Amino acid sequence: MPDIIQHLRDTYIENPAAAPKRRKHLRNMNRRPKMTSKELIEHYADLKIEIGQLEHEIADLCGKGWRMETDTVMASPTHEPYKSRPIPISGFVQSPKTAKACKRLIQIYDEKLRNLYFWQNKAEEVFDRIPEGKARAILRYRYIDGLEWQAIAAKIGGNATEDSIRKYATRILEKF
């Protein structure tokens, strides 16, 4: 899917040198509020959901408004007889209005995605700072995979209980 997204961005988004000319509301999206490490971890699953949604929207948006066009060109073969003849060509085209609307929406979605990727990277940096593997696993199960405390305790095994896992995670989050 990322290859499709990159292709669509390359196709529809203008030269990055034109970035200073972007609209005011797009520039404001780069102003990021402060988030604590605990908030980053707690909102990680939401970030992943929104990233997936925006990537899907971009792919879906660019698939709309295409129609089949057919035309002919005059050409001659590379061998004798060098007689010109019409050769049919066909392909899919998008109306200029639709292409312009898609381009504008993709620019907006791309800015949103950049912001979401920024926060996702920050959250991963927080996970990397957690020294214990067990703590990282518990927090990932809870905040990324969305598992309940009871299911996490079962995955961890041993004599771990729902309450012990929840309290351990709370202590880890308080450190950050």
Image (tube, rainbow, N blue to C red):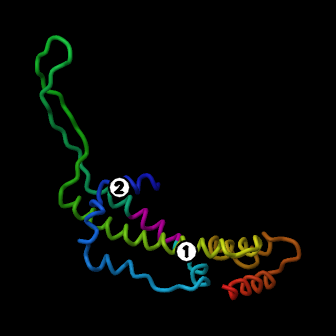
Location of the C terminus (image quadrant): bottom right
Quarter of the image for residue 90 reads top left
Please provide percent x and percent y for residue 126. 62, 76
Q: Please tell me whether mark 2 sits on a helix, a strand or a loop.
A: helix
Would residue 69 be found to the left or right of residue 110 on screen? left
Would residue 171 be found to the left or right of residue 74 on screen? right
| Residue ID at (37%, 52%) | 7
Q: Which residue is mark 2?
A: 8
Please provide percent x and percent y for residue 120. 53, 72
Would residue 70 be found to the left or right of residue 171 on screen? left
Q: CA distance from mark 1 to mark 2?
A: 26 Å
Rendered position, 93 above or below 25: above
Q: Which residue is mark 1?
A: 122
Q: Is disc 2 surrounded by few (<14), some (14 to 19) or many (20+) residues within 10 Å?
A: some
| Residue ID at (79%, 85%) | 163
Q: In the image, which is nearer the foreground, mark 1 or mark 2?
A: 1
Between 157 and 103, the one lying in front of the other is 103
Magenta stretch prevailing secondary structure: helix
Q: Determine if the magenta segment contains residue 106.
A: no
Residues shaded magenta: 48-57
The type of residue carrying mark 1 is Lys
Please provide percent x and percent y for residue 131. 73, 74
Q: Please tell me whether mark 1 sits on a helix, a strand or a loop.
A: helix
Please provide percent x and percent y for residue 146. 64, 74
The type of residue carrying mark 2 is Leu
